[in-house]
Image (cartoon, grey):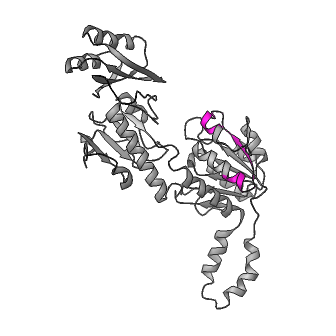
Amino acid sequence: MFKYACLNPIAAVGLNNFSADYTKTEDSNDADAILVRSAAMHDMELSDNLIAIARAGAGVNNIPLDKCADKGIVVFNTPGANANGVKELVIAGMLLASRDIVGGIEWVKENASDENVGKAAEKAKKAFAGTEIEGKKLGVIGLGAIGVKVANAAALLGMDVVGYDPYLSINAALSLSTKVNVTKDVNDIYADCDFISIHVPLSDSTRKMIDKKAIDTMKDTAIVLNFARDALVDEEAMVVALEAGTMRGYVCDFANTTTAGKKGCIVIPHLGASTEESEDNCAVMAVAEVKDYLENGNIKNSVNYPACDLGVCTTASRVAVLHKNVKGTIGAYSSIFGDANINIAGMANTTRGDYAYALLDLDGEVNDDIINKLAAIEGVLKVRKIK
């Protein structure tokens, strides 16, 4: 029997996939797994009972990844589950910025009591005229699940699309439209594009990557779209450029005092993944990841431990060992099974930076004494008897 806790509302379509072997608890300290969306976890005490955390979404800045890794807690996210919802809002953002639709709507609201509002609108509408996006050049920085969808959709709308991603995966490359060109130099995008949409994770290397230097390189008519993380853009420098008229617009999905109400800024209150479909998709994927890990020990879409999959166990027992990526560990736990006269029928040991994960299928029963010996190995962070 497993227990799970939800720190935020999680769509029922996902939670309903938990079987009778799972019960929901309101006490996160009693949970084997936690499902979370935006709740801040950095100051939380993480119970020794906790085995897994699943973020129903892509970003994991609200979760202390290193702290979790050191405690042997596997953190999952749901890449691609909300990609279509974000893609659609990016396209909407381009349309909002290229034509002053918001200004026009506000004008109609302000003049709603005018019985001749229709006639007056014909005279006023020239103030809200803009440009079309067909034929314009879009640069997409980051060709992950969302970036690829944005690039492909824009190409179908008749835009000239160029993408940049130094870590382009094989799956992303295969999903990318043949109409999308790829550059190896992000500066090509800064200098040449009418629209620039950024879709990269926030890290020390990407923080404020759209800085003053990059902004100064852009066209005076350029529009930047940021539906990833606000800290990817030096928003103070962006506001200065917009005030000076050396940038046309900035569309972002993160409300803050730097950009809210500023000239040229269209600020959306974090609606990228706020669709019924996205929330359902994220919940379903998060629950599937948690179940496969708790029941089988398999890891898919973890952000702090390596991927590992041995399917469903068909041997007498299965054990998972989460440990530091240091030499001698494999030999140490292999010796323990050898001393117990238990044959290792199948094994996977994968690594990710400073951390490693071993999944072992065994031909004999594993008792508590063996588990305790495994846990006592230097560098071992957590041991789980799965079967």
Task: Pinpoint residue 133: horizontal percent, then vertical percent.
Answer: 74, 59
Q: Quadrant of the N terminus?
A: top left
Report the residue at 46% width, 51% height from top: 281
Residue 237 visible in rendering = no
Name the residue located 43 percent from the left edge and 35 percent from the top edge.
65
Residue 168: in magenta span: yes
100 sits left or right of 279 in the view: right
Please identify the quarter of the rendering in which residue 112 is found.
bottom right
> Is there any visible trace of residue 267 in the rendered image?
yes
Q: Is residue 329 above or below residue 2?
A: above
287 to the left or right of 278:
left
Q: Position of residue 249 (x, y in %)?
A: 69, 58
Specify whether 277 is left or right of 317.
right
Q: How many marks?
A: 0
Q: Is residue 19 magenta?
A: no
Q: In front: 197, or 337?
A: 337
Using residue 361 as the reference point, say whether residue 272 is left or right of it.
right
Among all residues in the image, which is located at the extreme front?
Answer: 314
User: Residue farthest to the bottom?
Assistant: 115
* Residue 150 coordinates in the image, percent (x, y): 64, 50
Identify whether 110 is placed above or below 143.
below
Query: In the rendered view of the protein, which quadrant contains the C terminus?
Result: top left
Instruction: Give residue 344's position: percent from left, percent from top.
Output: 34, 15
Q: Residue at x 61, y 42 (%)?
A: 208
Quarter where residue 370 is shown: top left
Q: Quadrant of residue 97?
A: bottom right
For image coordinates 62% across by 39% down, the residue present is 172
- Please provide the residue range marked out in magenta: 153-173
